[in-house]
Amino acid sequence: MGARHQVRIEITYHQRLPGGGADEIDYDAKILAISAAAEMAGMHPQTLRQYDRLGLVEPARTPGGGRRYSVRDVTRLREIQRLSQDEGVNLAGIKRIMDLEREVQAVRAEAGAAVEELARELQRARAQLADLQAMAGPFGRSTDIVLWRGEQR
């Protein structure tokens, strides 16, 4: 039999940023054929097909029906493999874990947006308070304590 060669595949996909900025690697670009993704993940292509059917990964489809994976998908495939082999989690459990992770990410994003909106609202309220204090000017109510001694007889 022939000697088995180990091949390392490195793929980077650059996306040009608007405004002529520097390139940025797009980890979500669905550019990897199933054979390349399987090689990078250390799996058989049939395993990727099974994971697609189970909804563990969601590759894009070419017009001819071929699957295309992203670098982020390959990372996900490696995590599925780790959970399965190292942690002993079955595929249904892995799907549930990943669904929960997506939910947590969505909740974090929503909470982050809410915190930002509250910070903007607080800033607006402080600006309004400063405007009102400026409008009150010298006629504003004083909180100074004055010691009054009436006439002494």
Image (cartoon, rainbow, N blue to C red):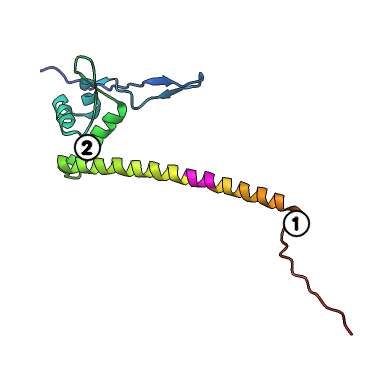
Q: Main secondary structure of the magenta part?
A: helix
Residue located beneath label 1 in the image: 139
In what element is the residue under mark 1?
helix
Mark 2 vs mark 1: in front: 1
In what element is the residue under mark 2?
helix
Residue 25, percent across and down?
Answer: 40, 24
Q: Which residues are magenta?
A: 116-121
Give me the residue at 16% from left, 44% from top: 88
Q: As displayed, is residue 69 above or below residue 139? A: above
Q: As displayed, is residue 8 above or below residue 82? A: above
Residue 118 magenta-highlighted? yes
Q: Quadrant of the N terminus?
A: top left
Residue 144 magenta-highlighted? no
Residue located beneath label 2 in the image: 80
Q: Quadrant of the C terminus?
A: bottom right
CA separation in Å, label 2 and label 1: 69 Å
Residue 107, percent across and down?
Answer: 35, 44
Position of 151 compared to 35: left or right?
Answer: right
Residue found at the very far left of the displayed protein: 1
Give me the residue at 22% from left, 37% from top: 80
Cβ atoms under marks 2 and 1 closer than 8 Å: no
Give me the residue at 33% from left, 27% from top: 28
Nearest the eye: 27 or 112: 112
Where residue 68 sits, quadrant-wise, is top left
- For disc 2, the neighbor class at 10 Å (few under 14, some 14 to 19, many from 20) is many
Q: Hey, what amino acid is under mark 2?
A: Ile
Q: As displayed, is residue 102 above or below residue 60? A: below
Residue 139, percent across and down?
Answer: 75, 56
Pointer 2 or 1: first along the chain: 2
